[in-house]
Image (tube, grey):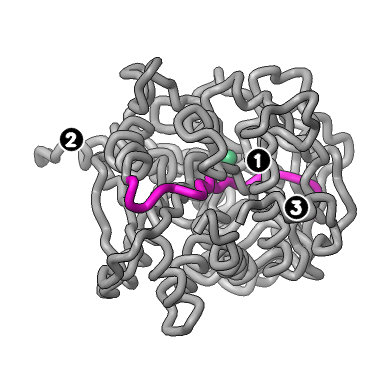
Amino acid sequence: MVDLPGSSRRFALVLLAAALWVGCHGSSDPSNPAIVVPRFSSDFESGSIHAVTQLDQEGLAWELKLRNDNDDATLPNSFRTWWYVRADDVPTQQSLRLEFSRLGFPYYFVPVYSYDGKTWQYFEEAEVALAPGFDLTKPDSCRLVIHKKFAAATVWIARTFPYTTNDLSAFLNSISTSPHVRIDTLGASPRFQKPLSLITISDATVSAPRKTIWIHARTHAAETGPSFVLEGLIRAVLADDATAKALRQHYIFKIVPMHNQDGVFLGNYRTNASSIDLEARWLPSPGSPYLDAAAPLENRLINQGAMVPALLNAAAPVVLALNLHSSNATPDTAAFFFPHFGSDSSKYSVAQRNLWQKQIAFIQEVARNYGGRIEQPPADGGSGFLNSFFPETWWWTQAQDSVNAMTLETTYGRAGFGHWVTENDLRDLGTALALAINNLPPTQRHSAETDDTTDTSMFRLPFKPEIYIEPEYCPLYYRVPEV
Ligand SMILES: [Zn+2]
């Protein structure tokens, strides 16, 4: 056996394990060599399935169990969301019945498939159903059943549009020749030594004071929607038009496009290679902007190499910090933000009320630029986030109301459209973010006090309180966990 560098050797072991697993499934029926049955595999980047079981004699019905991140059975059932499999020797004259089981969330959705691993399409709603008797307390009952006659013998099937570290590399290559783009590496991911990239976009010829926009994404590995949002936003900022030029002149964009690279590589849904959920692990050091040494490496690299320098850059103060995620939800839930605090002067300080004003004004502006397809924010965002260690908690501790730090959640369903949300719909959300940033009040480049935060005319959808209810079973979360 050739001696492989550490990271490659580990990947080889992953491949071997996957190959052994594949050998246990699929292949021809030994009792009847004339029957060729599908073979399922997940030995590729972001691939994920736990086990595959043939349910009938003919090989036309299969159960595919979802995998825990890192096969770690101690993780919550709600973390099982993602799958990504390849099937070969798929019959094209008969329908297959595929039952994806152990789903960790109860909402109807439609997965995607591809015949080339690149171009994805949704199944028809008529082809997809949740199994009767779906009960979250019984993981094996939680099944999404697909009936489909495929048009080719090889097909990839995923929970939603994949977006791997290779996809990110290809995108970074496509923008790297722009004179307005600089791509730095903040360090290497702990398990596979993947480069942790920081994208900086600005007009280098501008010497006037500017503001900084901070954005990071993919803390939760399989929440791929934000990668398409970032593509749209970055293209909008790099475009050859007046809005893009104004954005580059007024702002420096600092973007970490893929926080949890090991998790993405491994096909995890939420955690990194050590089963750590990086989201609530921005552990502070008292009196310092730097994270505690016990914080995960991925967070410390971003904190030391990018967040703190941006925070301390008085020539370009950070005004907006977006944390991009995706949330399982009912099919008609659109993208939404988690704003903090509220307008009640008996509950909140002047700074807290000012942050609230800025947050609602920004959400309204995004909704105006996205056809109203943003959920209405709650009347009060609460301060529960101060009891945990989210990135927004770090920004508030360091900069109070001067940084508008919020999480934006894309969703997987129709998301306010008359169709299941597409990659380009998500890119258009990125464009809407860019347009909203371009319309930020001048002091964030006016006091937001003049904005009417009670105006809901720009939102197309009815208010959905359930999005913002603090769940009793998860007191550490100030927001609904993404189940
Ligand atoms: Zn998330």
315 part of magenta stretch? yes
Ligand 1 located in image quadrant = top right
Q: Which is nearer the N-term, disc 2 or disc 1?
A: 2
Q: Residue at x 58, y 54 (%)?
A: 158
Q: Could you tell me the amino acid type at mark 2?
A: Gly
Say which mark, if any, is on residue 109: 3
Q: Is residue 150 left or right of residue 272?
A: right
Asked if disc 3 and disc 2 are in contact, CB closer than 8 Å, the reply is no
Q: CA distance from mark 3 to mark 2?
A: 39 Å
- 158 lies above or below 150: above
Quadrant containing the N terminus in the rendered view: top left
Residue 356: percent from left, percent from top: 68, 41
Q: Could you tell me the amino acid type at mark 1?
A: Asn
Residue 21: percent from left, percent from top: 44, 38
Quick one: 417 or 151, which is closer to the camera?
A: 417
Say which mark, if any, is on residue 354: 1
Quadrant containing the C terminus in the rendered view: top right
260 part of magenta stretch? no
Q: Residue at x 70, y 31 (%)?
A: 479
Q: Secondary structure at mark 2?
A: helix
Tag 3: Cα neighbours inside 10 Å, few (<14), some, or many (≥20)? many
Q: Secondary structure at mark 3?
A: loop
Residue highlighted by disc 2:
6
Residue 263: percent from left, percent from top: 43, 39
Q: Could you tell me the amino acid type at mark 3?
A: Phe
